[in-house]
Image (cartoon, rainbow, N blue to C red):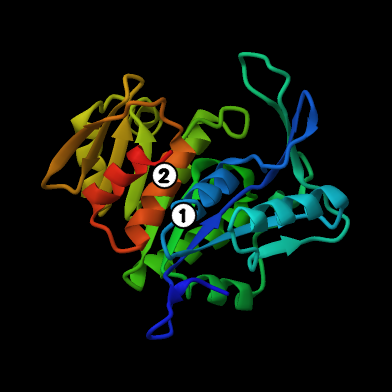
Amino acid sequence: MNPGDKATGTPAPRLAVIGETMINIGESGIQTRPAGDSAQLAIAAAGTGESVQVCLATALGDDPLSDSAVRALGDAGVQTTFIQRLPGELPAIAVDSGASTGPMTWRSGTAIRRMFPVHRGYLRELTTCDSIALTATSIALLTDAGRKTLLQLIRDFRNKGKRVALLLGPCPTLWSESESIRELDRCLSACSIVFAHRRDLDTVFGALAGDAAIDALHSRGITEVVTWNSLGQVLISNGQHRTAFISLHPINRTVLAGRYLGHQLAGHEAETALEYALADE
């Protein structure tokens, strides 16, 4: 049963996270929890305990590994309505070798590359959600045609007065710096919320640093900006007011963004949602 107000029969607000689900393979074998920015963000949003629906819009194959990923997402409270199962395709894989450089990934020719374009009924149903979230990785993975479809989708969504959230982050192996600047610049014009480490803003704005980069985001119509640094200092800005927080724990960007969106979608004001997100364990 979908969460919601049982007294009135009102369905709970719904967040659609668009992007990749990866199969995570560690030293002990296949991990239960899926990897990938978007999957982790969706799991974090679903785990807030709020009465919200969280869906992951992604593409997987029709193989046993994809089956296990779908089951794991469902077990984590993520709705699988928008998961496309593409015959003959395979999921992306992340192998954690324990190296300091992070996991090795295989994405070439995987299902996520073919997520967009997709039939209009799928796109119409996505736009019935209350909020959409995507990551820089989501954009980098798609073909040119796929990016055009995604960009039009979030533009239409924002034009309806709904919220579009973007999590910036490094994806150096997926595209060149010039390509990332161009594509992210196009996407930012359709977003209302941006999450970013301070150094990630350098990718888009170059010489602009600190508060100047935040001002530049607001000048594009972005209403909320959440940034943080390596010292655990977190700042939320709505263009007029900026409130600083200190995180007592290392910041996981996908978890922070997911928790914030889950709490905000439940009706909490932005600062309260961020405070709750930082306090969640």
Give the residue type at disc 1: Ala
Circles 2 and 1 in contact, beta carbons < 8 Å: yes
Q: How far apart are marks 2 and 1 (CA)?
A: 9 Å
Q: Name the residue under label 1.
A: 133
Furthest residue to the left?
240
| Neighbourhood count class around disc 2 (C-alpha, 10 Å): few under 14, some 14–19, many 20 upward | many
Furthest residue to the top?
100
Q: Nearer the viewer, residue 125 or 33?
A: 33
Residue 178 left/right relative to 121? left
Give the residue type at disc 2: Ala
Residue 163 left/right relative to 270? right
N-terminal of the two: label 2 or label 1? 1
Q: Mark 2 points at which residue?
A: 257
Q: Which residue is drawn at 58% across and 34% down?
A: 175
| The N terminus lies in quadrant | bottom right
Q: Residue at x 36, y 55 (%)?
A: 263
